[in-house]
Amino acid sequence: MILRACGWVTQFVKATLLLTMSICGMEVGLRVWEAYAPEHSPKPASSLSTLLVPSARQYQELIPRTERTWPGTNGQTVRFRTNSRGGRGEELQTPKPQGTFRVLWLGNETVLAPMLDEPLTPPHLVRTFLQTRSPAPVEIINGGFPESCPLLMALQYMNDWASTEPDLILIHVDRSAIERDRQLRRFTHASVDGRPLCCTHPSLTAPSAAQPARDWRERWRLIDLTIAWTAHLWHSQTAQKFTDDQLPTRSPGSFSSPDSQNALINGTEHTLRPILTILDLAKRSNTPMIVITSPVSQRTPEDQSFAKLLSEFCQTHRLPLINATSTWNDQNLSDAMTIPIAGNQQPPAIEQYSQIVAQTLLENWPGPWRVNPSRPVDVSRPSSERQPLLTRESTSGLPPQILRPSTPVDPRSTPMLQDGPRNQRGTGSAQMPRDHEIVPAGGF
């Protein structure tokens, strides 16, 4: 009887050891497989998520002064580095060098471009374009952040970017910000007048029951692989239940659905409201601000509806707007140029987007790149050949209009940026007028 029990124990121990060795062998094999075939790994396409840490002020932050490499677009290796402020790029000089025209560009992955090298990101492309036409140094700070929205941009500007003393602020907003804003509102603390104060990550306020599960997933890639394959199997089986003729003509939550139009309007109003916080802070230092929007996907009604609401918002608050969505439609660009802007980060789409922004600033905004800021826009060119101007859509059926400074800057008094009058921050950039006049530009 004792010998039989010992035999059972021996068999159990052997089976346990064999199972443990098998699991360890599979784990080692999976990690080796990931090293040689990263495209089949259950890990994210990039390691950008590993650079994000919880924040008590702005939900999440990028680890400062860090450098990582991962496979990017077209199989090229991307070098991603952050500075001391958590932004992408080299370290910023503080205080700002005398005579430098500094631009702060806030936005989501479209601005950050984590799957592209720094020379291919919009801030670098626009800076290169403007620098060749400017007698003064031009610096554009990449303030992009993963899945960013105006709420996060306002908090980031208050906490970090306001001290960089920018001479111009660019804010990129697209319709993906609406859903992100809904996710973060529950964690946001605001003042009595509705100004956001902080957005605390839930993991910092209460112990999470899912933390042990996340720890196990970090230690064992086999668990991640099982979860990823199970989710893929579930999605594939669910997709097989629907055929093309069974799909509804209108998705229930689509922005183009009449039933969801009120939801789109209310969601957009809540999403865009934090932009006013940035505007109020920027006015204290006489810093002008421009809003930019672009399509998220292939020229869909959702993008057009959001662009129209954003244009009305900018019209109400007298904010210049670069509407790249309408330009995508006017120039009839190919699908490959519009679909991957916020997704796979295709260089042609990013380059086209950067060209739109750079050409618009060059032709319509009085910066160091313009010797004569009062030069009128050439309206004799065909509408399809003109770059999108600082426009707002008219709600009364009139053609789009340009927002331009009402008081031109005299080039004789400020021939170069470093010789211009000092603003309240003591920098060498010309003070921008706050009021704007509306100049018709014709349809395009």
Image (tube, grey):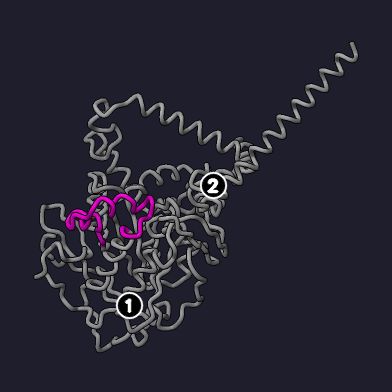
Identify the residue under disc 1.
431
Name which residue lies at 16% across and 62% down. Answer: 401
Q: In the picture provided, is 436 more to the left or to the right than 74?
A: left
Is residue 296 or residue 206 the one in the foreground?
296
Q: Secondary structure at mark 2?
A: loop
Residue on which disc 2 sits: 201
Image location (x, y in percent) of residue 262:
26, 39
- Picture quarter with the N terminus: top right
- Residue at (50%, 31%) from the top-left corner? 230
- Dot 2: within a 10 Å radius of its alpha carbon, few (fewer than 14), some, or many (20 or more) residues? some
Position of residue 37 relative to residue 380, above or below, is above
**What whole-number distance in Å separates the C-alpha atoms at marks 2 and 1?**
38 Å
Magenta region, residue range = 321-349
Q: Give residue 433's position: percent from left, percent from top.
A: 27, 74
Q: Is residue 25 left or right of residue 442?
A: right
Please provide percent x and percent y for residue 147. Answer: 43, 50
Callout 1 crowding tier (Cα within 10 Å): few <14, some 14–19, many ≥20:
some
Q: Residue furthest top?
A: 1
Q: Is residue 335 magenta?
A: yes
User: Foreground: 193 or 152?
Assistant: 152
x then y, percent, for residue 365: 26, 72
Residue 121: in magenta span: no
Mark 2 residue type: His
Camera-side residue of 8 and 409: 8
